[in-house]
Amino acid sequence: MPISPRAPRLANFLEKDTFAFMGGMSTSGSLTTWFRDRFAQAEVESEKSGGENAYAILAKEAAESPAGAKGLIALPYFEGERTPLQDPAAKGVLFGLNLKHTRGDIYRAILEGLGYALKDGTRTLQKRNRIKIESLRVSGGGSQSDAAMQITADIFNLPAQRPHTHETSALGAAIDAAVGLKLHPDFDSAIRDMTRVANTFEPIPRNRDLYHELYERVYRKLYRRLKPIYSDIRAITGYPAL
């Protein structure tokens, strides 16, 4: 990640001239798990008996929905939000629902909402630290979904790379250990030897343009306009209880 010379003075990370920029979302994997457990119960039971993975079925349905999920926008703030909102009162929203929307449309809107939220946090880190991002490495359970990977590439307008293993926390620990035990002379050598990109998803221009408009003109406006009334829900109903 190239860093502007005007960036604030930063402490080194694992070695000289390396830095870690951190942001956190309150819900991501927990949100897709919530959706699966409540709206794909038959598929979950079938999976227990040797059937197809329930997430894979939902991902296929999401892939059949067009970019923009037929006009459906999700705010994924189901447990408040951390970076960049720092707002524990934020709520989840499905905006634009109509009777023609399918389960696949809703799941796609959630994946897109998570992508928008990640872009929100990343853009804040970029502005505050004057860094430039040239490509993405996507790990974790969500990286196993081609639909989620393509959505991420399109929303960020950047290549989204899937590592050969999605358990990158464990892999990072192994790289640290390899350098510490002198199995590799430095981190660059260990990373070259122990990691590789399995797939790269390039942005699709028509989707990129659509997502840019939805992010700027709908997604970001929704939170700002709803924020004044978020706290009224709990004040009136007592839910969600803290």
Image (spheres, rainbow, N blue to C red):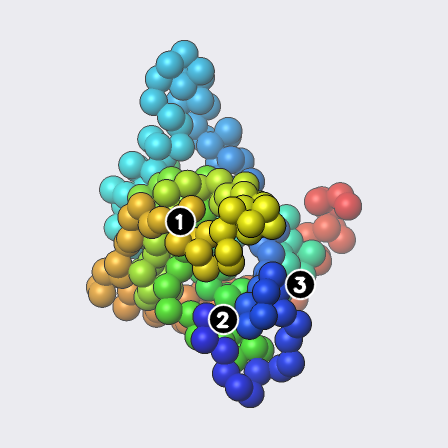
The numbered disc on residue 193 is 1
Contact between marks 2 and 3 (CB within 8 A): the answer is no
Pointer 2 residue = 123
Contact between marks 1 and 2 (CB within 8 A): the answer is no
Whole-number angstrom distance, CA of label 2 to CA of label 3? 15 Å
- Dot 2 or dot 3: first in sequence order is 3
Is label 3 in a helix, a strand or a loop? loop
Percent x, y for residue 1? 46, 70
Pointer 3 residue = 86
Q: Residues within 10 Å of mark 3 (few under 14, many from 20)?
A: few
Determine the image quadrant of residue 62: top left
Vertical comparison of 51 with 30: above or below: above
Residue nearer the viewer, 149 or 174: 174
Residue nearer the viewer, 185 or 176: 185
Looking at the image, which residue is at 34% across and 56% down?
Answer: 160
Is label 1 in a helix, a strand or a loop? helix
Residue 229 visible in the current orientation = no
Q: Residues within 10 Å of mark 2 (few under 14, many from 20)?
A: some
Q: Is residue 237 left or right of residue 36?
A: right
Q: Is residue 239 left or right of residue 212?
A: right
Is label 2 in a helix, a strand or a loop? helix
Q: Residue furthest bottom?
A: 6
- Dot 3 or dot 1: first in sequence order is 3
Looking at the image, which residue is at 77% across and 46% down?
Answer: 242
Question: Which amino acid type is marked by label 1?
Answer: Asp
